[in-house]
Each structure stands twice: as structure tokens, then as C-alpha cells.
């Protein structure tokens, strides 16, 4: 047996502090990023039903970004009521569901409306529909199980996979690079105590 001949563990991603501190908007793809990419399709008395599964720890990571004053957007190329419900639950600032996956156009109009520039945006994606925006934003990020093209387009390749902690991993990575994570966690804990 030759020791050390097995597959290498992926390196822990690092993020430049200056790049991180420029980010004012974080945008997430849905299928394969906020979810594991699976959809459950059903028929409820003649009505088509589409369900997705979200990760609660991812949601709390997004809350930490919001608490730090970072805007949150969701852009998906697949329309569903599930996404609208999750976006409402998380109180995200911008939601675009475009079944033709015109993500560059969608993000450009958000930036114009919000007075933001491409270098101030991080985008977390997983596959080909995300490549256009990943090539434009200041901080393109890919989940651990993203396609090879998405991984190549990313400045940060996460270890966790879509729907299973990748979003939480990125939120913590971004806030740690800005030197804000510990303070935001304490602020969150204090806010929970205050409401009891
Ligand atoms: Mg996707």
C-alpha cells in the first residue's frame, strides 16, 4: 500500500480581503446552488406542483450577509412558486425568475436600479447558464459540485455542494475575509436574546 496516493482533499478556499470588502451585492443561482438541483414534480388534483428543498443553515448565512448590510439577489432560469416563497421568507432584495435564463440582462438591470458596478457583485453559480454573469462580476464563485466550466470561471471554488451548505460556506468566507464574521455572529446572538 502506498500512503498518500488517494484523492487529494480539496484545498480550503481563500478570499482576498480587498476583493471581499468591495462586495455590496451577493447574487445566488437557485437550482444547484440554493438547492441540490433536484426538483419534485407532482400533480395535486390537476394542479402541477413543483417543490424544492432548501438548507436552513444556508438561510442563516444569508441573514448574516443582510445583517452586515450586503444586498441579496436571486436569479434563476426556472420559474416556480417555491422560489418566490423562499425569497419572501429570506426577505431577499431582488428576485428574478426568467425561464429563458437571461441572467446577464437581469443582473444588469438590478445594478442600474441600485447604482452598483459589476466589481461590487459576487455571484454564486453551478453550471452553464451562470457563465455569462460569472465572467462579468467582481467575485465569481462556484459550488463544490459545479460543472467544470463553472469551476474554471470562478475565483473561489467552494468545498460544500449546492443545497448542502455551499451557500453558508460562502457567506462565512466572505464575512471572515472582511473581518466581520465573529462580530455578526455575536450581533445575531444578542438580537435573539433581546427578543426573548
Ligand atoms: Mg444552477
Image (tube, rainbow, N blue to C red):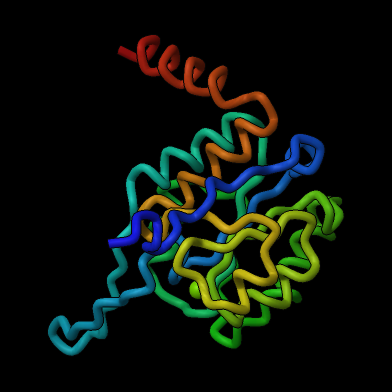
Q: Which quadrant of the figure has residue 100?
A: bottom right
> Residue 195 in the image: x percent, y percent?
36, 14
Residue beneath the point at 37% across and 18% down: 192
Residue beneath the point at 58% across and 47% down: 13
Q: Which quadrant of the figure has residue 56?
A: top left
Q: Is residue 88 visible?
A: yes
> Residue 186 in the image: x percent, y percent?
48, 15
Residue beneath the point at 51% across and 17% down: 187
Q: Is residue 143 shown left or right of residue 112?
A: left
In this orientation, which residue lies closer to the viewer: 24 or 17? 17
Give the answer, above or below, for where 115 lies relative to 7.
above
Residue beneath the point at 63% across and 59% down: 141
- Which part of the image, by quadrant, shows the N terminus? bottom left
Q: How many marks?
A: 0
Q: Is residue 165 shown left or right of residue 46?
A: right
Give the answer, above or below, for where 132 lies relative to 34.
below
Q: Is residue 94 visible?
A: no
In this orientation, which residue lies closer to the viewer: 177 or 55? 177
> Residue 140 in the image: x percent, y percent?
69, 60
> Residue 181 in the image: x percent, y percent?
56, 26
Q: Is residue 31 shown left or right of residue 53?
A: right
Residue farthest to the left, as pictured: 45
Q: Is residue 195 shown left or right of residue 151?
A: left
Amino acid at each position: 500500500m502506498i500512503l498518500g496516493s488517494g484523492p487529494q482533499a480539496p484545498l480550503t478556499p481563500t478570499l482576498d480581503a480587498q476583493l471581499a470588502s468591495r462586495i455590496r451585492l451577493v447574487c445566488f443561482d437557485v437550482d444547484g446552488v440554493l438547492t441540490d438541483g433536484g426538483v419534485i414534480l407532482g400533480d395535486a388534483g390537476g394542479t402541477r406542483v413543483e417543490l424544492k428543498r432548501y438548507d436552513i443553515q444556508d438561510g442563516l448565512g444569508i441573514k448574516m450577509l443582510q445583517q452586515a448590510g450586503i444586498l441579496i439577489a436571486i436569479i434563476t432560469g426556472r420559474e416556480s412558486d417555491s422560489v418566490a416563497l423562499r425569497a419572501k421568507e429570506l426577505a431577499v432584495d431582488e428576485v428574478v425568475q426568467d425561464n429563458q435564463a437571461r441572467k446577464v440582462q437581469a443582473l444588469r438591470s438590478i445594478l442600474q436600479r441600485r447604482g452598483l458596478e459589476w466589481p461590487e457583485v459576487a455571484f454564486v453559480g453551478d453550471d452553464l447558464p451562470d457563465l455569462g454573469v460569472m465572467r462579468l462580476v467582481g467575485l465569481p464563485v462556484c459550488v463544490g459540485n459545479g460543472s467544470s466550466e463553472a469551476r474554471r470561471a470562478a475565483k473561489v471554488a467552494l468545498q460544500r455542494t449546492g443545497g448542502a451548505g455551499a451557500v453558508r460556506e460562502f457567506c462565512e468566507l466572505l464575512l471572515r475575509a472582511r473581518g466581520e464574521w465573529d462580530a455578526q455572529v455575536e450581533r445575531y446572538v444578542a438580537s435573539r436574546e433581546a427578543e426573548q
